[in-house]
Image (cartoon, grey):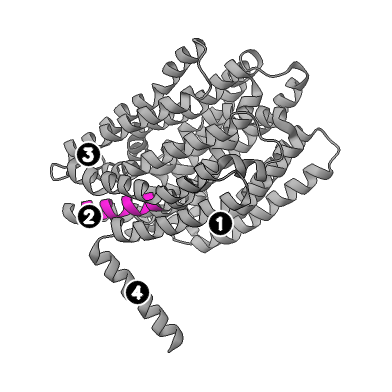
Amino acid sequence: MGVSLYTSRVVLETLGIENYGIYSIVGGVIVMFGFLNSSMSGATSRFLTFELGRNDYEKLKKIFSAALTIHFIIAIAILILGETIGLWWLENKLVIPPERMNAARWVYHLSIISSMIDITQVPYNATIIAHERMNVYAYVEILNSLLKLGIVYLLVVGHFDKLILYAVLTLCVTIIITTIYKLYCSKHFSESRYKFAWNKDILHPMLKFSGWDLYGNMCVMAKGQGVNILLNLFFGVAINAAYGIANQVQGVVSSFSSNFLIAVRPQIVKYYAAGEIENMQNLMINSAKYSFLLMFFFSFPLILENHFVLHLWLKNVPDYAVIFCQINLLSALTIFMLADSIIVFATHATGRIKNLSILGGTIYILVLPSSYFLLKAGFSPIVPFVINIILAIARSLTNMACLKSLISHFSITKILMKVTLICLYVIFLSSLFPIFFHITLDEGWIRFFLVIFSSILSCLFVGYFVALDREIRMKLVRMVLAKLKFRYA
């Protein structure tokens, strides 16, 4: 996280707002086609893990080869779509200064290559996850961070076109990291040695599994990049720089809660498979509260002090970056407060995601036409972010209804009372002192530290006594006492 925030600052400073915005919008065109890969990656991970659990290594080899074949096809599809529809969109629709169009083309083509490499890496990553070799990720990601620092250094000292140089160096890092993952898998996992085979008995269930997820992923991708494109069409590349910064800040802050939920997902599936619906719902309630607390702990002081933090972090803050960051973080808090990710996990556990994908995806995509008409009418660029919050609430409630239709014992009321209402209590009680300091003091280091300090203490105190059940509090106390006793024994 530290490296990401530091490199973002230097990259924005070195490239400038215009070039940073061009990189954000041009790279986003390629990301739009990534919904094909998103749907298939989930199926790949599921089938590899399932066969590994059965110790059927012969079938595991066939599944890996089939998955890699599918991802090769997806990579070729991205190449074709990117060099036809995407290139036409770049040349004719995006608002890019004429003198920077050549650099934008370089970034675009290099982004296509990088995307293709990432796509073919998915089965290898899924294999590592299936074997639970998470230490490999730790070491490789440390290297990845060091390479990103190297990019920053070369970008500063380099005398070539900064935007093109940044795209080339980013592609080089992608190639290095992908090669390491592939070499590790080939050496340690026999099933990861590719052998072409077109086995319909293997391919059909994998494609069917990912089929319904395709529409939802497509809508999610179209919404995110579509808003980026709409902002470009109405306000130019400078606003795309602000949008890119806001998304990066939200991604970094949300990662704490998202990583926590990785451990929760398999447990939800196991409870459902065993028919233990009550235990599953209790786990959903607790994990939803904990993930919200993590998100709130890091995001709330940042929402209040965003202007100070961004100007401290970035020397040249793009217009609207502050308000974009604040609304993005509020949107993420809303989604966690409504246990949206947990509800999706439980629905996926049932294997019946048709209604979830269609209804949820459609609500996602409604952000685009709504934003277009309002922006066309002359409204502020914050409009898409506000609409997104409103529709996120509607989508979360719809997802709850979908899960209720699949699991009759699931209680929407219990989720709203034990998660959403508790989270609202936490927000209200934890925000009193930080908001007081934010309103009464002038912006500066004193106010910043007081807001941070009071927010941390309030969140810990209120979270402990309001969000945690008595049983969990007692268990936590026993764990702490046991650790202290062991340490000082």
Front tag of 4 and 2: 4
Q: Secondary structure at mark 1?
A: helix
Q: Where is 156 relative to 135, above or below?
A: above
Q: Residues within 10 Å of mark 2 (few under 14, many from 20)?
A: some
Residue 467 placement: quadrant = bottom left
Residue at the spot of label 1: 186
Per the picture, the main secondary structure of the magenta-coloured stretch is helix
Circles 3 and 2, Cβ within 8 Å, touching? The answer is no
Q: Which mark is residue 479?
A: 4
Circles 4 and 1, Cβ within 8 Å, touching? The answer is no
Front tag of 1 and 2: 2
Q: Where is 76 relative to 488, above or below?
A: above
Residue 263 coordinates in the image, percent (x, y): 38, 57
> How many dots with numbers?
4
Residue pictured at 46% horizontal, 28% vertical: 385
Residue at the spot of label 3: 403
Find the distance from the CA under tag 3 to the CA under tag 1. Answer: 40 Å
Front tag of 3 and 4: 4
Counting residues from the start of the chain, the first of labels 1 and 2 encountered is 1
In the image shown, does 421 or 370 lie closer to the viewer?
A: 421
Counting residues from the start of the chain, the first of labels 4 and 1 encountered is 1
Front tag of 3 and 1: 3
Image: magenta residue range = 281-293
Residue at the spot of label 2: 282
Q: Mark 1: which amino acid?
A: Ser
Counting residues from the start of the chain, the first of labels 3 and 4 encountered is 3
Counting residues from the start of the chain, the first of labels 4 and 2 encountered is 2
Q: Mark 4: which amino acid?
A: Met
Front tag of 3 and 2: 2
In the image shown, does 69 or 243 lie closer to the viewer?
A: 243
